[in-house]
Image (tube, rainbow, N blue to C red):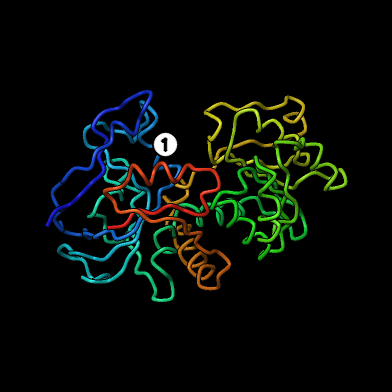
């Protein structure tokens, strides 16, 4: 029995993927209070790529770091004192708490986690939905809840064609919130409209702030979610009401943002929203588990499944995950 693992051996500035290799690591032992999970399926998330691509990133530890922010697996072994789960159960390990900081992500066959950080997956939820149970659905639920948008008002979101963006469209519609969705390619407009998007703006041929004023009759959006940052944030802030909230949760355009001073004078609040911080709150975690599992069972939040690759073909999976119009989330299987 071996534990295959994708490991960052060294940081290669102009080609980070060149520093990754498939190695064999020892299978973790079930220490007291711990659960060893054999991961069978995990998604390739943007946060996974960021974890090894940024030199000096806190999680990237060349020589030992294994990426992977979530996944689903089977309980392989349990340590002394563990009674909540048993061998053979299908579970989601919440590895964001301790494993990521140690460089022990899900891009390997086996992981060990605290017993209180595994969730037994109901039979009603598929492997593909369970494998991406945390990062996107919990972020969507958390951000949209925190904005406290009244029914009938608009939320503006960037990168709306992403898996997270599509889930937000459906959840907002379920909660009675209207969406203004910003994308780069106008070809995505019809697709997102068919999914339930109220309005779609393409940055390739439209000005975001101008269109939002037209759509809302000058009221502007109640709040906004920005996955891009950079120059686009200025347009996002200009598109929300006086005193409106803008959450930045991604850095697709880099780690700097531009904001109009006039929007700050209007009381627009620009803050970062970070899932790991939210997960440290036990009660919040319980709400996420309860609400998101029901949303998945009711098909409000559904997995967008693309191609699946064996763990050994991680390089192909990474490349596929960044293709424009790839058609769904890319997965790695064991």
Q: Is residue 296 left or right of residue 121?
A: right
How many numbered discs, if any?
1
Is 45 situated above or below 152? above
Q: Please state, as top left, top right, bottom left or bottom right, where the C terminus lies in the image.
A: bottom left
Q: Residue 201 appears in which quarter of the rendering? A: top right
Q: Is residue 246 left or right of residue 320?
A: right
Residue at the location (16% across, 46% down)?
A: 24
Q: Residue furthest bottom?
A: 123
Q: Secondary structure at mark 1?
A: helix
Q: Residue 307 appears in which quarter of the rendering? A: bottom left
On the image, the x and y values in percent for residue 171 come to 62, 61
Residue at the location (14% across, 53% down)?
A: 2
On the image, the x and y values in percent for residue 227 come to 57, 40
Residue at the location (77% across, 54% down)?
A: 153
| Crowdedness near tag 1: few (<14), some (14–19) or many (≥20) residues, C-alpha within 10 Å | some
> Between residues 242 and 181, which one lies in front from this camera angle?
181
> Between residues 210 and 19, which one lies in front from this camera angle?
19
The residue at which mark 1 appears reads as: 50
Q: Residue furthest right?
A: 217
> Between residues 245 and 161, which one lies in front from this camera angle?
161
Q: Is residue 185 left or right of residue 13?
A: right
On the image, the x and y values in percent for residue 59 come to 33, 36
On the image, the x and y values in percent for residue 257 come to 60, 28
Residue at the location (54% across, 68% down)?
A: 295
Q: Please state, as top left, top right, bottom left or bottom right, where the N terminus lies in the image.
A: bottom left
């Amino acid at each position: 029995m071996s534990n295959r693992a994708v490991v960052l051996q060294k940081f290669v500035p102009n080609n980070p993927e060149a520093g990754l290799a498939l190695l064999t690591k020892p299978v973790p032992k079930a220490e007291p209070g711990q659960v060893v999970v054999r991961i069978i399926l995990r998604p390739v998330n943007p946060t996974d790529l960021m974890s090894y691509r940024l030199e000096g990133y806190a999680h990237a530890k060349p020589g030992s770091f294994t990426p992977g922010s979530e996944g689903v697996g089977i309980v392989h072994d349990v340590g002394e004192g563990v009674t909540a789960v048993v061998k053979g159960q299908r579970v989601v390990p919440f590895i964001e708490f301790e494993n990521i900081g140690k460089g022990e992500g899900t891009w390997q066959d086996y992981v060990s986690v605290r017993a209180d950080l595994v969730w037994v997956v109901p039979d009603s939820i598929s492997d593909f939905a369970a494998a991406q149970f945390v990062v996107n659905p919990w972020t969507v639920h958390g951000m949209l809840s925190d904005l406290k948008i009244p029914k009938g008002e608009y939320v503006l979101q960037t990168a709306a064609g992403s898996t997270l963006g599509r889930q937000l469209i459906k959840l907002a519609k379920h909660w009675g919130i209207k969406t203004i969705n910003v994308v780069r390619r106008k070809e995505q407009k019809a697709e997102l409209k068919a999914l339930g998007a109220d309005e779609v703006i393409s940055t390739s041929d439209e000005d975001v702030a101008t269109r939002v004023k037209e759509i809302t009759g000058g009221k502007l959006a109640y709040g906004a979610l920005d996955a891009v940052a950079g120059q686009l944030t200025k347009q996002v802030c200009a598109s929300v009401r006086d005193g409106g909230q803008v959450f930045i949760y991604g850095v697709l355009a880099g780690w700097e943002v531009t904001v109009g001073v006039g929007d700050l004078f209007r009381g627009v609040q620009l803050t970062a929203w970070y899932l790991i911080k939210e997960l440290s709150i036990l009660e919040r975690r319980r709400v996420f588990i309860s609400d998101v599992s029901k949303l998945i069972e009711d098909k409000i939040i559904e997995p967008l499944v693309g191609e699946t690759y064996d763990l050994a073909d991680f390089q192909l999976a990474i490349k596929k995950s960044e293709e424009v119009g790839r058609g769904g989330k890319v997965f790695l299987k064991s």
